[in-house]
Image (cartoon, helix red, strand yellow):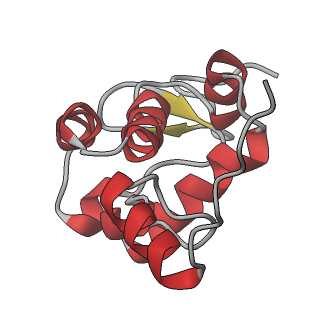
Amino acid sequence: MVFEGRAPHLQWETNGTVSTPDMLHVDYDRWGQTPEDLRHLATNAPHQRTRERFLALYEVTRASCATQVAARTHRHPQTVMEWLHLYNTHGPEALVYRRTGGRPPFAPRSRLASARSSAPPSKRRRRRR
């Protein structure tokens, strides 16, 4: 069977790349963005995790698939696919890193104040000579 022109089972994107119906894509048009906007967000984000997420999406827009991006970045493929789904459903704000808990970052002044208020200092023992 010979196909005239383009293969019917492939979706041809406006930028000339090919994607299959099963391939995930970044829906940047929905949020009024371009791949260059994703790259700009990746290079200017204040947190490293946010930069990593936007850079992964940018690479997916450059005719790459989430699995290939995951292999290059040493991430699990499901992680990259989750970032893609979050972006497609909730927009760019969904990829911004937010601290959700755990031990607070080290802050010398607050640590000293909390230590003073929680327990009185113990007496120093004399050394034997």
- Which residue corresponds to the image point at 72% horizontal and 21% vertical from the top-left? 71
- Can you give x and y, in whole percent of width and height, for residue 14 in the image? 30, 37
- Can you give x and y, in whole percent of width and height, for residue 26 in the image? 44, 50
Residue 95 is left or right of residue 77, and the answer is left
Q: Nearer the viewer, residue 113 or 91?
A: 113
- Can you give x and y, in whole percent of width and height, for residue 116 in the image? 46, 74
Q: Name the quadrant containing residue 69.
A: top right
- Which residue corresponds to the image point at 64% horizontal and 63% vertical from the top-left? 123
Q: Nearer the viewer, residue 119 or 69?
A: 119
Res. 113 in view: yes
Res. 21 in view: no
Residue 117 is left or right of residue 22, and the answer is left
- Can you give x and y, in whole percent of width and height, for residue 7 in the image? 62, 30
Is 99 above or below relative to 13?
A: below
Is 64 above or below relative to 46?
A: above
- Which residue corresponds to the image point at 33% horizontal and 68% vertical from the top-left? 93
The quarter of the image holding the C terminus is top right
**Numbered label tally:** 0
Q: Name the quadrant containing residue 39.
A: top left
Residue 105 is left or right of residue 22, and the answer is left
The quarter of the image holding the N terminus is top right
Q: Nearer the viewer, residue 85 or 3?
A: 85
Q: Name the quadrant containing residue 17.
A: top left
